[in-house]
Amino acid sequence: MAGGHVVPSNAQISIYMPTTRPGIPSAPARSNLSRIRFFGQEFFLFSPDMTSLPTLLFVPGAWHSPESYRRVVDQLEAVGYASELVHLPSVGPAQHLPDFSRDVAHIRDHLQRLVAVGKKVVLVVHSYGGIPASEAVRGLDWDSRQRNGQGGGVVHLFYCCSFIVPEGKSLLGAFGGIDLPWFNISEDRLEVTPDRPDEVFYNDMSEDDVRTAVSALRPHSYQTYQSPCTYAAWKDVPTTYLYCAQDAAIPLAVQRMMVEELAAGYPIRTELTDASHSPFYSKPTELALAIRRAAGEEI
């Protein structure tokens, strides 16, 4: 039966309760039971308690609209998750930004509104989005708010082939200050666009999907890459990193280096998918399941 499992009333009833992982607040308890009759026999219907699921906040990377997550969001909302999408001010602005502060503030506005009403938040970030998102979490993580007698908070970070950068370093500074070879940078060094996005971002997608994805890209504010990070949320918040094996933008070796070297000593949980830089397009079901596991489900 869609939405739950049917258990005869004379059978032993097993309540599915996801195991809480170390450092993660209690996972959602899925223990709603209702009594029904079917062909003269009494059953219990087991269904999820949707109110206990964390809220998912999605932050895209450079050049991308948050609608790039749509295939993933639709799957997650279908199983009961509430979600919000962040549109980064640095993507397609009327006037390019001098640093990442507006991105940070915009993400933080979303977070503050959610935690103020007691929401537990899983923050899903992609590529550049991990930089301002980490900065935006300061003081809004679950543990900090609990210590201050406040409800709600960020309970998990989910990095989808995203940048992990320590305090004091900018995105580019963490990698020697060298522009990536596929950057097209304007003469005034305010705007950057990607060269060959079909090869760099979407190398595991159909031609039709690539055309649609490329047409949705917008110029990005280059100077956001020069902003030094002052807070590393992954040091305080339980974190999952999804490695993307076919990523041509941030190669797998670089993804592993960030987790194993830049974030050495912090217990970042990892998963691997055989995807390009954009699994939200090419592997939406795999990405949705990985996010659900980060949210506390055992699936």
Image (cartoon, rainbow, N blue to C red):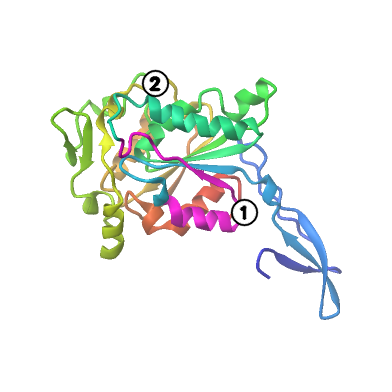
For the C terminus, the image quarter is: bottom right
Q: Does 145 lie within the magenta span?
A: no
Depth check, mark 2 against mark 1: the one in front is 1
Q: Residue furthest left?
A: 187
Name the secondary structure under disc 1: loop
Q: Residues within 10 Å of mark 2 (few under 14, many from 20)?
A: few
- Nearest the viewer among 75 and 246 is 75
Can residue 262 be seen in the rendering of this structure? yes
Q: How many marks?
A: 2
Q: Residues within 10 Å of mark 1 (few under 14, many from 20)?
A: some
On the picture, is 243 further left or further right than 123?
left
Label 1, on which residue? 80
- Say which amino acid is labelled 1: Gly
Label 2, on which residue? 167
For the N terminus, the image quarter is: bottom right
Boundaries of the magenta span: 69-93
